[in-house]
Image: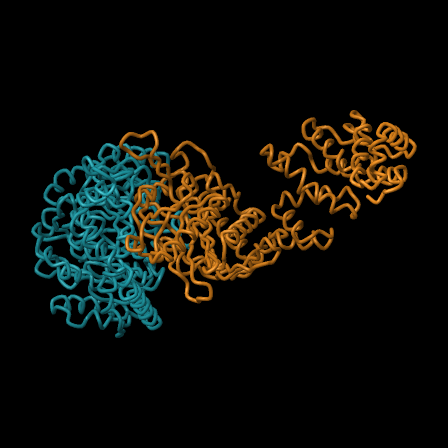
Chain colours: A orange, B cyan
Amino acid sequence: MSDWEVVIGLEIHAQLATQSKIFSGSPTAYGAPPNTQADLVDLAYPGVLPVLNARAVQMAVKFGLAVDATVARRSVFARKNYFYPDLPKGYQISQYELPVVARGSLNIMLDDGAVKTVGITRAHLEEDAGKSLHEGLANASGIDLNRAGTPLLEIVSEPDMRSAKEAVAYMKKIHTLVRYLEICDGNMQEGSFRCDANVSVRPRGQEKFGTRAEIKNLNSFRFVEKAIQYEVARQVELIESGGKVVQETRLYDSDKDETRSMRSKEEANDYRYFPDPDLLPVEIDEPFIESVRATLPELPDQKAARFARDFGLSAYDAGVLSASRELGAYFEAVVAGLSGAHAKLAANWVMGELSGALNRDSVDLEHSRVNPQQLTGLLKRIADETISGKIAKEVFEAMWSEGKSADDIIEAKGLRQITDVGAIESVIDAIIAANPKQLADYRSGKDKLFGFFVGQVQKATGGKANPAQLNELLKAKLGGGGNA
Amino acid sequence: MHNLFIGELADRLAKRQISSVELTQHFLGRIERLNPALNAMITLTAKQALADAAAADARLSAGERGPLLGIPLIHKDIFCTDGVRTSCGSRMLDNFVAPYDATVVARLKAAGTVMLGKSNMDEFAMGSSNETSYYGPVKNPWDTAKVPGGSSGGSAAATAARLTPFATGTDTGGSIRQPAALTGVTGLKPTYGRVSRYGMIAFASSLDQAGVFARSAGDAAAVLQVMAGFDPRDSTSVDVPVPDYSKALGQPLKGMKIGLLREFFEGLEPRNAALLEDALNIYTGLGAETLQVSLPHLPLSVPTYYVVAPAECSSNLSRFDGVRYGYRCENPKDLMDLYKRSRGEGFGAEVKRRIMTGTYVLSAGYFDAYYLKAQKARRLITDDFRAAFDKVDLVIGPTTPTPAFDIGAKMDDPVLMYLNDIYTIGANLAGLPGVSVPCGFVEGLPMGLQLIGPHFAEAKLLNAAHQYQQATDWHTHAPRGYT
């Protein structure tokens, strides 16, 4: 494998979060009964005409500005002609030679912490097709045109990714970005965010790209990773056994974890693109661009840089906490109630216990059972040493299941940390008295037994003894070989 | 009554000398009696017409007045009409009842017009003789062995035969002006974008424009007044103010510069040339100045058109796939069979020829040589016109090379047929308004004089046509048997 270099480019389809469709007034809401959100324009009735939704253009421009791209002063809608039942007009309105956004770039962070810049060739506006339904209909297919005409932004990357992991990192970054910009809900189950992957391999050191295969319609990060891995292995194996990769479109079967040929280049449609005469070129002027720029939020990279700078977080932590606008806001709300010195503590808890609980119970951050103020309440008690970090985890679980404040739980369960020297010493004395053999062994050099005594004391106190104090006092009492 | 102009009819309606119901009954009676020999109509809407006429009468009785209130009309069957079959002259849409009104239809309806029915046309407006209609050819009322021109042949024949005071049409390459010339009526194609295309079944979207057939420029002005205007549902309609066209009709022509298109006059058939000579004398007599202008790229217009129009049509007609509406073949065995047979059986030969031509010129490897080159030629032709209009107010020439030809004469030779539109296509490619007015007869058949103006110069154009009609009476001649 190491003799081969993998080359990947992604075409991401992000469904734009407009209220109505890109060329008609029908609503775009997901999940309505079939064909209830399709008007005469969506159904391509004779005589009807498309009218461009200005919101979609605004969103595309917003994306363009966020990836530092060129926003075209003049872009053109073109017709992509092919026959399919879920494509009512017999052509898709898309952009071809003159897309609204061109030449942008995006930084992604690799596993080793290195930052890589991925080029964005272009992003263009187009309409989605409808859906064919094959289930439950004998000898027939149903057509649901609710999705027909939904605005999409197709984001085409340069072939800059060199592994499945990089491809996933790029896709996740775009996912983060479009949600930051509030131009796409990012819902992958509903198909609002999906991608096609162009994959090829070439001998390491060779400049010329290998023949690529395009894997269509990948709608989860995991599938992107697995499909690319499978495809890379397939291509390498094929070439190494004397075969040749053919340019084709392939489908990923997640059940079997394999890609299968859908159609070859020879069978590919000639789409006969030409400018759509029903739509005028989209003219965008500087004031419009500036008005959109004014709506740009703090972008993920800016937020991460600020977190790292202001809170002293590592690049990795800052990256994780800025991966979604909501998570960043949650973290900042938690930090707001603490002194700056405890930002790292807050970061650890948000990324650790909180994210763990959300994942475990499949809860959105928005519906978290512990809100930022509650978490701040808990972290304050760690900061002021009322409870230990270990006890805090227990308190957090109780907060998560009972919804009470940290203080209430600490009081009710008597979890307040023992910091009274006399109280800790008396427990230590009792433990030492009860374990003469272990004491003798420890003093004769078995340092590891220190942990035994710590455990016994914490068992006796219900884990409430202040760990630092306990260590110190225990060391003094045990004396002798106390090098632990 | 059927020889009265719209203004005269409106006047009598206003004075309650006649009712809209009487007027409607009169024209329905003429259609019933005279149309069988002409085949100008595809669908009659007599019952609805009488109801609409009664409604118009009620509005009139209530004191409401309007230049078209209570006036009957015929719509070309390319305009969608809510609840009424809209066939576009094709088997493909023989069973298609439109669920909405085209903007043109809605505007005329709101003005109180009364739709008598829908007129015959070349299939999907593709033709110059009205012989490609699924409903059979339309006959020219001046000689029923002759074609009325196309594609709006039904509207032209019906207007000439006084089956209606006026009719709507569409003009993609001459489909209003050419049949108007061949049937002796006034036909106006407005500037591209002046009238909404919403609800007008598309043939070639960048060329199609709705217009009007009437018996005078004055009548055409009254109708355009209602049809014109920006429509937010048509992105290519233009938001410029609509002037008062009728008011503009009184302007003297003194000092107006009329350009004689050299390319139009070269090689013109002598009798046609003589009629134009007469017309030019009229204009100079009215105080206009005539001077030679040249559009050097105009000879490219027919080949340019027959790339651009088929390219757009090949895509526009893809929606007719037998899936959602319109013709569907019997017992399709699979999806491909459904597509192939529905389209193969639903479309006629000329439509298929243009879909194939258009598909070819847009195909990979041919796109640059045909489609792009045609776009360049189109720009050159547009620039030629622009340069001409720097020197003159309007340009003038014949509408057609010959009078109406025999039914069947050109059906076997598409190129010969396409050359009928040699004088009209330029205005479509450049998006310019044009009008054809009757200017005499050759072998007993009417001929047309064509005026073309700059973008949105309809008022000037209609005034020039009107002044000519004030000085001549060619537009008042009716075919024998239809007087």
Left or right of B56 in this view: A376: right
Q: Position of residue B92 (x, y in %)?
A: 21, 42
| Quadrant of the image occupied by residue B108 | top left
Look at the image and tell me in which quarter the C terminus of chain A lies: top right
Left or right of B198 in this view: B477: left
Q: Position of residue A439 (x, y in %)?
A: 85, 34
Left or right of A217 in this view: A456: right
**In front of the other: B266 or A115:** A115
B204 up-or-down from A461: above or below: below
Q: Position of residue B88 (x, y in %)?
A: 23, 45
User: Which residue corresponds to the image point at 39% horizontal and 54% vertical from the top-left?
Assistant: A237
B423 up-or-down from B142: above or below: below
Q: Does the image show residue B242?
A: no
Q: Position of residue B389 (x, y in %)?
A: 33, 69
Q: Does the image show residue B158?
A: yes
B382 up-or-down from B57: above or below: below
User: Which residue corresponds to the image point at 68% horizontal and 30% vertical from the top-left?
Assistant: A400
Q: Among all residues in the image, which is located at the extreme right?
A: A422
B135 up-or-down from B186: above or below: above
What is the total number of numbered labels drawn onto the structure image?
A: 0
**In front of the other: A276 or A176:** A176
Left or right of A117 in this view: B199: left
